Amino acid sequence: MPEMEPIPDIKDIIAPPEVIDPNINFFLIIGIIIGSIILLAYIFLYWLKIKTTLSPEELTDQRKKALDQLHKLKLDHTKISAKEVANIIISSIRPVIQSKFGNLSLSLTTDEFLIQFKAYSKNLLGDESSDALIDILNDCDRLRFSPNNENNSERENLIISTIKLVRNFPKKDENSSTN
């Protein structure tokens, strides 16, 4: 028989090198902390954005601008159509209403505005101002959509009542729980 080679010693099986198992809990906690910080920063910035509102000087400027537009309209209301009169009245009181009720009020129709804000406006403006605002909005709608609206005295009375409302409209910080 041929000469047999000696059997080499059996070598130990070497286990694969240990891979450090990443601690998933650590990364999860870090991720939650970073996410929470980002969320809190977003909420804080959104809150600051909401809190920055019109100053009383800006409201006074809006009132002055609205009164100037209404006085100019009072002089020229016979020369323009009833629909334009109503549009000018609404566009002049819109910034004043926006300062009290926010941007949401600008996108609503008259009926939606009255339904959503009737109780709120009574608390905010009192019964007299609330009713005056409701009457003005309804009269403007009547002027815009009525076929026979050529009565100049109705237009002038509407302009006068709007001027009176804008003059007596409470300032932003009066009776307001939104500040």
Image (tube, helix red, strand yellow):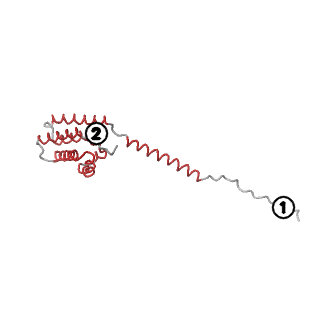
What residue lies at 70% left-to-right and 55% top-to-bottom?
16
- Residue 56, quarter of picture: top left
Q: Position of residue 84 (x, y in %)?
A: 18, 40
According to the picture, the residue beneath numbered tag 2 turns out to be 171
Q: Amino acid at mark 2?
A: Lys
Q: Position of residue 86 (x, y in %)?
A: 19, 42
Left or right of residue 98, residue 28 in this image: right
Front disc: 1 or 2: 2
What residue lies at 20% left-to-right and 47% top-to-bottom?
131
Q: Amino acid at mark 1?
A: Ile
Q: Secondary structure at mark 1?
A: loop
Q: Position of residue 80 (x, y in %)?
A: 15, 38
Left or right of residue 145, residue 23 in this image: right
Dot 1 or dot 2: first in sequence order is 1
According to the picture, the residue beneath numbered tag 1 turns out to be 7
- Residue 1, quarter of picture: bottom right
Left or right of residue 161, residue 38 in this image: right
What residue lies at 49% left-to-right and 48% top-to-bottom?
36
Q: Is residue 97 above or below residue 5?
A: above
Given the current orientation, which residue lies at the most extreme bottom position? 1
Is the residue under label 2 in contact with that under label 1 (CB below 8 Å)? Answer: no
Label 2: how many Cα within 10 Å (few below 14, some 14–19, many 20+): some
Mark 1–mark 2 Cα distance, whole angstroms, equals 103 Å
Which is more toward the observer, 107 or 1? Answer: 107
Which is more toward the observer, 171 or 133? Answer: 171
Q: Position of residue 175 (x, y in %)?
A: 29, 43
What residue lies at 22% left-to-right and 42% top-to-bottom?
90
